[in-house]
């Protein structure tokens, strides 16, 4: 009787090695490069946006708040809010002076410190509230807040005493109202925010593009009422003076003007070239969102309003790099989408890392350097990257049950 030796059992096939997509690798490399550049600039250049926070030099360092404060004082004393001793001209509508009138009772330095602390609190709270609304995990929430605290837009906002904390709260409140099923309230809140900063007005056009006419008129009404209240408080002539100043202000050729008109000036072109390009971009954004709305894939409680906002900032004559704070909720919304894979989340991480690069980046470029036009375009490129990301993410099916959304790890 013959016997046969047992045949060796073959090892089960191994699963293929898991590889990172090239796009994810690129996003990680970009984030690391941004963080390395940030660290190097902090080590080799004085970051006056941080070092100057404790200064009492209101006229030179905290010039924006100095302007706001003088206008608020003029309002409470019955004076002209656009003719004050401040170094900079007030480019904001009268309603802002009315909103800041309580600070007129304080010394300008004390008022700045209180306002800066309030601004920091409002911005951090707004970002944390967005993370809570999106049900992001504790890791993403902590990362978003940390990225915010080290971001150059936040430092610039606090250093100059700008109003982006107030604007961010208004935009976030409107967006959350939209997500909670209150489109008229959302539009009205957007309208009041636009009354404070008219360059944000394109966000009011999204309901019209989607043929949601009641929210559209609610947004227009909110902006008109808030503007009228400010004009009545400061005197009807103040509204005319504000329009004259606003339309007469030239486009500044400075590094941190991220708008396309400013980019055109940096490249030696008329600012009108950037304005036209920005208008085409904004119209195209609204047209695309209108087209995809008819297909049922655009959610006004998703990234759509933030995409329109980013397009409007690119078209605006002046969009300081600090404006990036206003579109942060949109990029965080990208993370929470069910369709957001590891590549898209890595890209969001890169966008947040890019915002940490301080404005001392401009010190690296001299007129003789042939790469200067490209290097000085950094903040415009970052804003454009935010816009592209937000617009691409806007084309997704609305979430059917937000209340049952799972936490995003």
Image (spheres, rainbow, N blue to C red):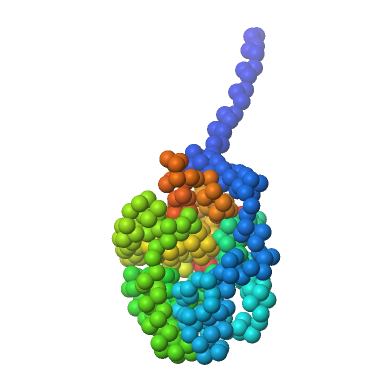
**In the foreground, 3 or 381:** 381
- Does 172 sit left or right of 124 as displayed? left
Q: Position of residue 17 (x, y in %)?
A: 56, 33
- Quadrant where the C terminus is found in the figure: bottom right
Extreme front residue here? 85
Res 66 → quadrant: bottom right
- Does 371 sit left or right of 126 as displayed? left
> In this rendering, does residue 337 appear at all?
no
Tell me: residue 319, above or below residue 24.
Answer: below
Tell me: residue 367, above or below residue 19.
Answer: below
Q: Name the residue rendered at 37%, 77% in the picture.
A: 244
Q: Name the residue rendered at 63%, 12% in the picture.
A: 4
> In this rendering, does residue 306 appear at all?
yes
Q: Name the residue rendered at 34%, 59% in the picture.
A: 271
- Quadrant where the N terminus is found in the figure: top right
Q: Name the residue rendered at 53%, 86% in the picture.
A: 75
């Amino acid at each position: 009787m013959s016997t046969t030796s047992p045949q060796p059992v073959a090892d089960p096939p191994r699963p293929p090695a898991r590889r990172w997509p090239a796009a994810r690798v690129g996003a990680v490399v970009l984030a690391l490069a941004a963080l390395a550049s940030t660290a190097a600039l902090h080590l080799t250049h004085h970051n006056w946006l941080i070092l100057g926070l404790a200064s009492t030099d209101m006229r030179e360092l905290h010039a924006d708040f100095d302007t706001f404060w003088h206008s608020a004082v003029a309002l409470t004393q019955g004076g002209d809010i656009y003719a004050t001793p401040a170094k900079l001209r007030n480019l904001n509508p009268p309603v802002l002076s009315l909103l800041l009138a309580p600070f007129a009772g304080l010394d300008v330095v004390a008022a700045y410190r209180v306002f800066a602390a309030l601004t920091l609190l409002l911005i951090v709270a707004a970002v944390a509230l967005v993370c809570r609304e999106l049900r992001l995990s504790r890791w993403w929430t902590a990362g978003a807040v940390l990225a915010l605290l080290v971001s150059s837009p936040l430092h610039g906002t606090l250093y100059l005493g700008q109003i982006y904390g107030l604007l961010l709260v208004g935009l976030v409140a409107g967006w959350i109202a939209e997500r909670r099923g209150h489109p008229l309230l959302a539009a009205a809140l957007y309208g009041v925010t636009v009354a404070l900063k008219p360059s944000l007005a394109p966000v009011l056009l999204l309901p019209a593009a989607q043929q949601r006419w009641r929210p559209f008129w609610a947004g227009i009404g909110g902006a008109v009422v808030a503007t009228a209240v400010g004009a009545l408080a400061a005197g009807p002539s103040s509204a005319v003076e504000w329009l004259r100043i606003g339309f007469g202000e030239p486009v500044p050729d400075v590094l941190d003007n991220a708008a396309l008109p400013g980019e055109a000036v940096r490249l030696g072109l008329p600012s009108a070239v950037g304005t036209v390009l920005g208008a085409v971009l904004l119209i195209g954004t609204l047209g695309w969102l209108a087209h995809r709305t008819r297909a049922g894939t655009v959610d006004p409680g998703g990234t759509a309003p933030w995409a329109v906002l980013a397009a409007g900032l690119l078209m605006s004559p002046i969009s300081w790099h600090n404006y990036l704070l206003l579109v942060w909720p949109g990029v965080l919304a990208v993370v929470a989408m069910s369709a957001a894979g590891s590549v898209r989340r890595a890209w969001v991480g890169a966008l947040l890392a890019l915002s940490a690069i301080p404005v001392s980046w401009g010190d690296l470029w001299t007129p003789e350097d042939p790469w200067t036009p490209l290097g000085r375009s950094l903040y415009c490129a970052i804003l454009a990257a935010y816009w592209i990301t937000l617009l691409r993410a806007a084309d997704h099916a609305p979430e059917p049950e937000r209340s049952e959304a799972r936490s995003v790890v």
